[in-house]
Amino acid sequence: MSTSSKMLLIGKIQATQGIRGQLRVIPFAGDASSISQLDQILIKAPNGALESFPVRSAKAHGKRVILTLEPFDNINQVLHLVGRELYAERGALPELPADEFYWSDLLGLNVVTESGEALGELVDIIETGSNDVYVVKLDGREVLVPALEDVVLSVDLKASRMTVSLPEGLLDL
């Protein structure tokens, strides 16, 4: 599979919005612009298949996106989509600034401290009100790393590595 046809997880449907078939989406790419520029969205069905839907409109609404898909025009038609993941082709997504990444690019990275100590693999990202939190696991141990500029020193996607400077006391048991 080429990079341009690679499917990326770009968000999750959080709830319906209003009664006209709109969906409230949590974007997994920093802001709403990556979703609002798409012509097609793929939604993961319960059986794992990806269903394609044309995007009628997508607007930023705070940190969320209000998404309207064809052919839906009332709430009853979209209730079954709540909780599902959204995907898009990598080539259809806009390029991000050098210091921003799609969540799917970060998942699976090896996380190390600035002194080279292995913390584990980035396995999940938790969205909080102020900043994301990276869930890093190694040998049953879980470390929650705040996604802050002064904590995340570098991200090297080619080397599959994230280097962090952990706040004092974060690893204390």
Image (spheres, grey):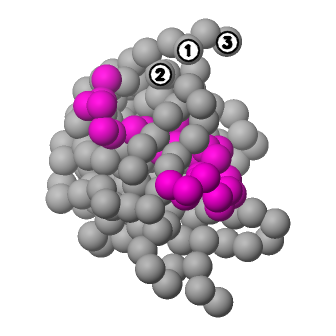
Res. 3 mark: 1
* Label 1: which secondary element: helix
Q: In this view, does 148 lie above or below 73?
A: below
Q: In which quarter of the image is the C terminus?
A: bottom right
Work out whether residue 23 can be spotted: no
If you read the primary sequence from the N terminus, does the residue marked by circle 3 or circle 2 appear first?
3
**Amino acid bearing label 3:** Met
Q: Tell me which residue sits at (69%, 48%) in the image.
A: 46
Q: Is residue 76 magenta?
A: no
- Place of residue 21 in the rendered image (x, y in percent of width and height, measured from the top left): 33, 49
Residue name at image x 36 percent, y 43 percent: 29
Residue 114 locus on image (x, y percent): 50, 55
Residue that lies at the very extreme toward the right in this rendered image: 139
**What stretch of residues is rendered in magenta?**
95-123
User: Between marks 3 and 2, how big is the CA–CA gap?
Assistant: 11 Å
Residue kind at label 1, given as amino acid type: Thr
The structure residue drawn at horizontal position 51% and vertical position 61%, both measured from the top left corner, is 134
Horizontal side of 63 relative to 131 (left or right) equals left
Residue on which disc 2 sits = 90
Hey, what amino acid is under mark 2?
Arg
